[in-house]
Image (cartoon, rainbow, N blue to C red):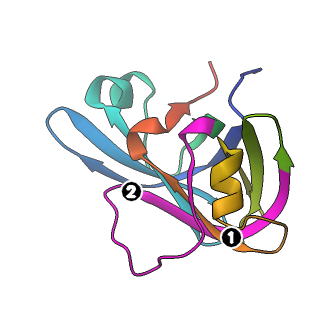
Amino acid sequence: MKVSARNIFKGPISAIKTGIVNAEVAVSIGGNDTLVAVVTMESLNTLELKMGKDVVALVKAPWVMLMSEGSDIRLSARNSLTGTVKSVEVGTVNAEVTISLPGGSEVASVVTKEAAAELGLRPGVPVTAVIKASNVILGVPA
């Protein structure tokens, strides 16, 4: 499978919470890291998502927000993945930031170069990747 999303996570489903319209699906992505996706009940059934089933979770890099401080801040975004900056590639307008998570996964984010500078992003700096659950796309082998 070839996709344009920079963030491709693979892992088993570790939890499912169903509702009338949507379901919340948690995917173990390594170590203690979990990524939560919100999918429609139709997608849950069509993809035959069940506990333990291996899935692929896709997140485009521009959908990943970054926080360099603020562990005491409460957010409505379901996913907060804390790690350290591995690299920062600065372009004319944007910067691509790669974050190493404790479980071995990496997360790529595209932010403005001004935001990267304001957050003091450079290799080794602690940072949290914030991802809305509705921005996580789940897939299974066809």
Quadrant of the snapshot with the N terminus: top right
Residue 142 relative to residue 132: left or right: right
Pick whichever, 65 or 28, lies toward us: 65
Q: Which residues are magenta?
A: 62-88
Could you say where residue 23 lies in the image, as x and y percent from the top left? Answer: 29, 41
Q: Is residue 106 visible?
A: yes
Disc 1: which residue: 83
Amino acid type of disc 2?
Answer: Arg
**Circle 2 residues within 10 Å: few <14, some 14–19, many ≥20:** some
| Residue 117, label in figure | none
Q: CA distance from mark 1 to mark 2?
A: 16 Å
In primary-sequence order, the first of circles 1 and 2 is 2
Disc 2: which residue: 78
**Residue 94: within the magenta?**
no
Q: Residue at x 72, y 23 (%)?
A: 4
Amino acid type of disc 1?
Answer: Gly
Could you say where residue 64 lies in the image, as x and y percent from the top left? Answer: 57, 46
Q: Secondary structure at mark 2?
A: loop
Could you say where residue 97 lies in the image, as x and y percent from the top left? Answer: 75, 51
Quadrant in the rendering for residue 101: bottom right
**Circle 1 residues within 10 Å: few <14, some 14–19, many ≥20:** many
